[in-house]
Structure formats: C-alpha cells, structure tokens
Amino acid sequence: MGVSIAQLALLQIVFSVAICIFEVPCGILGDKIGVKQNVILSCFFFSLFFFLCIYAPNLSILIPAEVIYALGFALCSGADSTWIKGLIDGGGYKGSLIYHQVNAYKRELTAFMNTVAGALGVLIVLCMDNYQSAYYFCSFGFLVLVFFFSRVRGIGIASVSGSQLIGSSSLLHATEAFTYLVTSKIGLYYILICGFIVAALQPIFHFWQPFILGQTGVLDNATGKTKVLILGLCFVSYTLVKYLFNRFVIKYLMHKYAPMAITLCSLVLSAVVMFALLLVANSWAPIILFTVFHSFFSVPMTQFEAEFFKHIQQKNANTVLSIVSFLARIFGILALVLIGWLAKSVCIEAAFCFALLCICFVIPLNLAWLYTDKK
C-alpha cells in the first residue's frame, strides 16, 4: 500500500533483472544438490520477503526485498516440476497422459490453497484492522513450509547424483541443456510460448489491483482498508472459481479431448474474456470477468509444461526448465520496462491491451506445436 504505479513498475523491473541473474545458477544447483533443498531455501527467502514488506512504501527496503523475492522464485522455478517429473518417471508412466493429469491436479491444489490463504488473509486484515498483519501471516506460513519440507523423507529428489555432477563442469551442463532447447522445434516453441505468457502475466500479476479498482469505478471513494478487503475478496473469488474449474471442468474434458486441444481452447477463451474485460467498466462486472479469465488462463502454462516433459531427460530437467524460465524473464523485463515507461503518459488499461496481444501471439504457436506433433 502507498506504492505508486511507477514505483511498482520499478520494483518489478528489479525483481525481473534479479531473477534473470539467479535463474540458471539456481537451476544447476537444483540438479547438483537436489530440488528438495531448492524448495526449502525458496520458502525461507519467501518468508523473509513478506516480513520486509511491512516496511512499504520505503523503497530502500523494498528493493532488497524484491531481490530476495527473486532469489526465492529462482530457487523454486522448475524445482517443484522436476521433483514431480522424477516421481512420475520413477513410476514408469513416461509418455502417457499422466503429466497432464498430475499438472491439472497441481493447478487444482494450488488454487484451493490460494483460496484458503486469501480467505485467511482477508479475515486477518478485518480482525486486526491492519493490512500489515497479512504480511506477518504469510511470513510465518512459509516458515512452516520450511519445517514441513525439511521433514519429507524417502523421495528421490535429485535428478542425478551429486558426485556425478560435481566432477563435471556446470557450464557444460548448462550448455548441453541450452543446445537441446534451441535445436528442436518443440524447444523453440516452448521458449516463445513461455516468453509471451510471462509478458502477458506482468500486468495481470503486478497491476491487477489498480486495474480492477479503476474498472469498477464504484470503489473510487473507498478507504484503504475497504480496498484491501475488496481486493482480497476478489482474490478469493478468482482462486475459488479457478479451483472449481480445474477440479471438475478440466478433469472432465481431459477424458474427452486431447490436452493440447484443451489448451488451445483455453487460450482463445482467455483472449475473448480479456477483450471483454477491457470494454466493460464502471460496474462490478470486471470482477466477474477477471475471475473467469483466471480460470481459463490457469491452464496453458502448466499444460505446455506437461507436454514439454515428454521431450526432456530427467538428468538435466531442472536446468532446462531454468533456462526456459530465464529466457522468458527477458520478455517479462521488456514488458515491465514498456509499462513503466508509459505509466505516466497512458492509462493502466494499455498494459492489459498488451497482455491481450501477447495471449494472441501464443495461439499460432500452439497450432504450430500441434502440427509438429502430428508430423
């Protein structure tokens, strides 16, 4: 609270630059010491980040906090997916629909937990009469996760044994992973798809609060506490609907249609709803449309990742995913620079027009992927 759009853009540029620096080294680290350790460390840094957020809008503290946040994301990026992939491959399911089914369950569980966390956050703000109390809650929650993951045992978490990789060059390991990516059509499609999705997510993820407040219009005269509660309820609404959508609709469709066809439909519907969201204003309808949009747009990223799992080896999976994430972050940085540069001369709706354009670019790439798979 109290941070302007331009300051928010600056903080997100710091975050994106920092995560670009940390992304690949953290991916190699995950292949070297095991992805479980990466996840534990990421939870610790997330906890520290939320604790530092209580000092907003002090940029001298928020900027280092964003660097810490980026380190947490870089450690976790790809690590959870690599962990899941290792368990699936160990069970002999490789090449089946299990990747898509597990990722659908992952989306479902994530949306459910986001709903619970969001509802608790709203209750805490309401009861404590102070939005900073929600930051304490988040910080404590991630410390609990540090303890929980440290107690998990009996899971083969490392892609390769530590001694096997320590004796080899980390640079060579990263080079081999990068070469694999750029020499295959699917790898190039996946890089571009992730890039455009990450670029589209920048305004959606970082600027949805002022956008929703501006589109509804009815909240212009609301107090700070009321805005926090309304936005919290909006968050709970779209995470709950996203959970129900993945719990029932996607599970049903997965038994009827090919996963990539479902992904294509979800992209088209996401673009249509985003277009409607830009047209409708001065009512509560944008909150409903934003909720529906999140349901549709929750599908593509994990579904593309699940399809890509079929084309990578477990021994360098975390590094491959980290390189893809690193390249996608470049798209994100360019998007944030553009938004920050235009923040004082154009309205926030322009950033969401940019998001719509990026979503539209993903659709032909989805079609090209389908065509390549058929060949």
Image: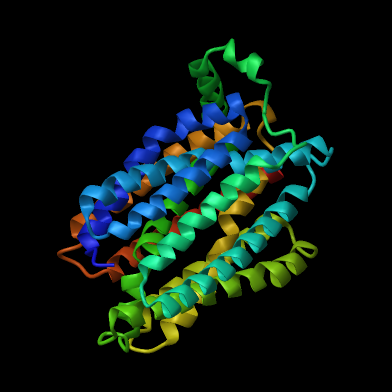
Image quadrant assignment for residue 186: top right
The spot of residue 115 in percent (x, y) is 57, 70
Query: Would residue 28 appear left or right of 133 to someone viewing this image?
Result: right
Q: Which residue is more in the foreground, 345 or 275?
A: 345
Query: Would residue 360 appear left or right of 312 to someone viewing this image?
Result: left
Image quadrant assignment for residue 106: bottom right
Coloured how?
A: rainbow
Residue at 31% x, 63% y is: 351
Q: Which residue is more in the foreground, 183 or 18?
A: 18
- The relative height of residue 339 versus residue 90 in the rendered view (above or below) is below
Image quadrant where one finds the N terminus: bottom left
- The relative height of residue 284 versus residue 155 in the rendered view (above or below) is below
Residue at 79% x, 65% y is: 256
The spot of residue 336 in percent (x, y) is 30, 52
Is residue 140 visible in the rendered image? The answer is yes
The spot of residue 2 in percent (x, y) is 24, 67
Residue at 36% x, 73% y is: 130
Q: Looking at this view, name the residue that lies furthest to the top.
A: 167
Q: Looking at this view, name the residue that lies furthest to the front.
A: 128
Number of labels in the image equals: 0
- The relative height of residue 250 versus residue 289 in the rendered view (above or below) is above
Q: Which residue is more in the foreground, 75 or 53?
A: 53
Is residue 360 visible in the rendered image? The answer is no
The spot of residue 39 in percent (x, y) is 57, 41
- The relative height of residue 180 versus residue 89 in the rendered view (above or below) is above
Residue at 50% x, 42% y is: 42
Image quadrant where one finds the C terminus: top right
Q: Looking at this view, name the residue that lies furthest to the right.
A: 92
